[in-house]
Structure formats: C-alpha cells, structure tokens
Amino acid sequence: MKKKLTYKQRLLYTLVGAFLFSFVIYNMAIADSIELAFKNSEFREQIAKSQNAPEQIKILTKKIKQIEQLVGTNKDYSSVDIHQELLESVTGYVQKNNLVLKDFPQPYLTTANGYVTKTAQLTVEGGFINLLKLIYFLENNYTVGKVVAVDFKTSKELRTRKRKLNTTIYIQNVKTETHEENT
C-alpha cells in the first residue's frame, strides 16, 4: 500500500529536512568562517596593542631601573664606604653654600627579609632655600643612597635670641643580603 502524504506532513518533513540540512551546512562551512572571523578580530586587537609596544618597553625598563636603584642591585657599592662618600658630598656642598654641618653620626644597619638597609643621618643648619637646595643636590647627585625623610626644626639661641633652622636628612641604601648560598 502506498501511503500518501498530506500537505501538512510534506511541509513538516520539508521543514525538518531543511533544519537538518542547515545544521549540517553550518557545521561544515559557516562555523569555520565565523571562528576565523573571531580569530581575525583577536589578532587585530593584538596588533593594535603591540603598536605601542616600544613605549611600553621603555616604561617597563624605567620601572625596573627605579626598582633596582631602590634595592641597590644595579651597581656594586660594596667597595665604596657609603658614609665617607656622603661626608665628602655634603662637606663640599656645605662649604660652598654657607651652611653648617651640625651632626653626622655613624649610620646604622638593619637587616630584614633578605635586605640590608643602611641609614645615614645628618643635621645641617642654614637658610631654608639653601637647605632645600642641599636636599635637591643629594636627591639628584648622591647615587649611593636615597633621601627618604627630611625633618625641619627651628631652635632659638639663648644668648643671641636668634632663630636658627636645622634640618635632619635621612638617607638610606638598600641592598640584598649576601649569604654563602647566594654568592
């Protein structure tokens, strides 16, 4: 017996067949094209990001140099007496700019987390602008350590009743602790 299909059944079978055919076509041809389009857009984004790569490299190298300068790994100052170097720098500047070096104690060392921190302290007396210039000089020209703190204080002399400005400058040098295993 031949079974005759009604129009509704033919339409239903045609729709199911079209759906299956479109699913197969999508998986075989269109899916790869869409995937390639997404990859293409990702590559374009990567190219756009890498356009300024030299600038990013410069920024990162500057950050690395700053970190190395803070940690003290960029130069070896083990043979240099940091305290003597600071004394020479400050003494020359103080003599030229009419300042008085009041106090220059021995630096103290602290060791923590694998780093050795050497902190030097110096007290200088003089005018405010000259003291600021000294701090600027130490920040820019003293390469063995960094100025980490400054304290300004005024004092009044009892004999002359004049006020004098003193500044205490703290300079630190941080370097990695050397052990027998590390060397």
Image (cartoon, rainbow, N blue to C red):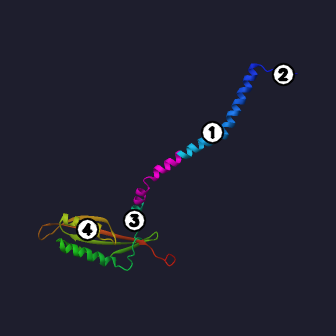
Residue 23: percent from left, percent from top: 68, 35
Does the stretch in magenta take in 54? yes
- Which region shows up in magenta? 41-59
Question: Closer to the camera: disc 2 or disc 3?
Answer: 2
Do the numbered discs 1 and 4 sit on residues whose CB atoms are within 8 Å? Answer: no
Residue 157: percent from left, percent from top: 15, 69
Label disc, if present, on residue 137 of the rendered structure: 4
- The answer for how far apart the CA atoms under marks 3 and 1 are is 51 Å
Most extreme residue toward the right is 1
Label disc, if present, on residue 177 of the rendered structure: none
- The answer for how far apart the CA atoms under marks 1 and 2 are is 37 Å
Q: Residue at x 70, y 27 (%)?
A: 15
**Amino acid type shown at disc 3:** Lys
Residue with the mark numbered 3: 65
Front-most of 50 and 71? 50
Residue with the mark numbered 2: 3
Q: Closer to the N terminus: mark 3 or mark 4?
A: 3
Front-most of 103 and 53? 53
The quadrant in which residue 177 appears is: bottom left
Q: Closer to the N terminus: mark 1 or mark 2?
A: 2
**Amino acid type shown at disc 2:** Lys
Label disc, if present, on residue 30 of the rendered structure: 1
Number of other residues with Cα within 10 Å of mark 2, as a class: few under 14, some 14 to 19, many 20 or more: few
Question: Closer to the camera: disc 2 or disc 4?
Answer: 2
The quadrant in which residue 121 appears is: bottom left
